[in-house]
Image (tube, helix red, strand yellow):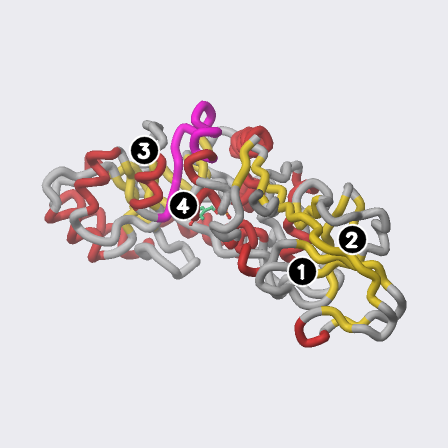
Amino acid sequence: MPRSTIARIDLQALRDNFALAQKLAGSARAMAVVKADGYGHGIRQVALALAEMAPKYAVACLEEALAIRDAGLRQPVVLLQGVHEEGDLSGCLAHGFEPVLHSQAQLKWLECCGDRPDFWLKVNSGMNRLGFRPAELPDVMAAIDAMGARPRLLGFVTHFACADDPSSTRTAEQTECFVQGTAAWPELMRSVGNSAAHFLPGQPLFDWSRPGIMLYGGSPSVGKIGPELGLKPVMTLEAPLISTRIVKAGEAVGYGSAWVAEQDTPMGMVAIGYGDGYPRHAGTDTPAAVGGQRIRLIGRVSMDMLAVDLTNAPDARPGDRVELWGETVGVDEVATCAGTISYELMTGITARVPREYR
Ligand SMILES: *Cc1c(COP(=O)(O)O)cnc(C)c1O
């Protein structure tokens, strides 16, 4: 019998979240961002589940895009980091992948490449990770014209640094910088906007938005949890209770004896730990649930197990399923307790945890 530690994936919730993204995108079309193995949900199953709805997918790299083709899907796939070597460009053409080129080195490869794929240009409007500054664009465009690649250029992409914070003025500044910097080429398409930008009132998303985390039910906005934004949880992380006991007042639980019972306390051990990707930084009081009843973690998370306080669920027995996050406990709540974001939790679930699809 396999251990029943499992990530249940609700593909209908995924589709509902995509429908919300497309609705919020208004006249822009939404490309489904499925990088990092579909944010830990399984790129193949996620891409297949969205096949009827998503006009385009986006991933970080070529290997991820190939997984979409392996699933038999024919939509264009945007490579958000472009390519890592010249030879990859011909692969892009063969497979219908659209690299986002962000550097002079990538432009050189494009110049040398015989058969060029459709591509995008990354504009650095203030994130300062990747891309050409607006002031560089006239020269970049001249170089593209000179190499005869202009017919393959789809448009401009930029990425926001602070869209998760509605009170920040940076998103408006970046938008203005992007609009002005690309104004000379109105015939080309524009793509801005991660999930967070979909929730900013009045934020233009131009031709293509790029929702990622919201498809999986995670909140992209600081201080909000997914359900508050109308998002449905897609992943339910579950593990069995494998032992229960009463810890007596004064006894400690787990490594470092980090938690000491103030009174006799019913507790249980759950078969999941950081070896499964559950965050070790989630300390005492991080929520979990059993039978729909909220309980809390106590002590340190081990590699293969963690301890919970069963005071709120005195009838819980070994074999019962504990929800680490899902319907009852939001993944965003656990992320906050662990000092991180839902992105890291979802993408961090390890291969030891089977994904089960519904
Ligand atoms: C990952 C990524 C996205 C999606 O971001 P979310 O915050 O998950 O919606 C969009 N655009 C780019 C360039 C990305 O790298």
Q: Which residue is mark 2?
A: 295
Number of marks in the rendered image:
4
- Tell me how far mark 1 sits from mark 3, CA to CA: 39 Å
Q: Which residue is mark 1?
A: 306
Q: Secondary structure at mark 3?
A: helix
Q: Secondary structure at mark 1?
A: strand
Q: Of the residues shown, which amino acid type is indicated by label 2? A: Ile
Q: Quadrant of residue 93?
A: top left
Q: Is residue 71 above or below residue 121?
A: above
In the rendered structure, the answer to whether residue 229 lies left or right of residue 317 reads left
Examine the structure image and report whether residue 135 is included in the region drawn in magenta: no
Q: Secondary structure at mark 4?
A: helix
Q: Which residue is mark 3?
A: 69
Q: Mark 4 packing: few (<14 Cα in 10 Å), some, or many (20+)? A: some
Give the label on residue 37, or none. none
Q: Of the residues shown, which amino acid type is indicated by label 4? A: Val
- Regarding residue 357, the answer to whether it shows in the image is yes
- Tell me how far mark 4 sits from mark 1, CA to CA: 50 Å
Nearer-N-terminus badge (1/2): 2
- Tell me how far mark 1 sits from mark 2, CA to CA: 13 Å
Q: Which label sits in the foreground, 4 or 1?
A: 1
Q: Secondary structure at mark 2?
A: strand
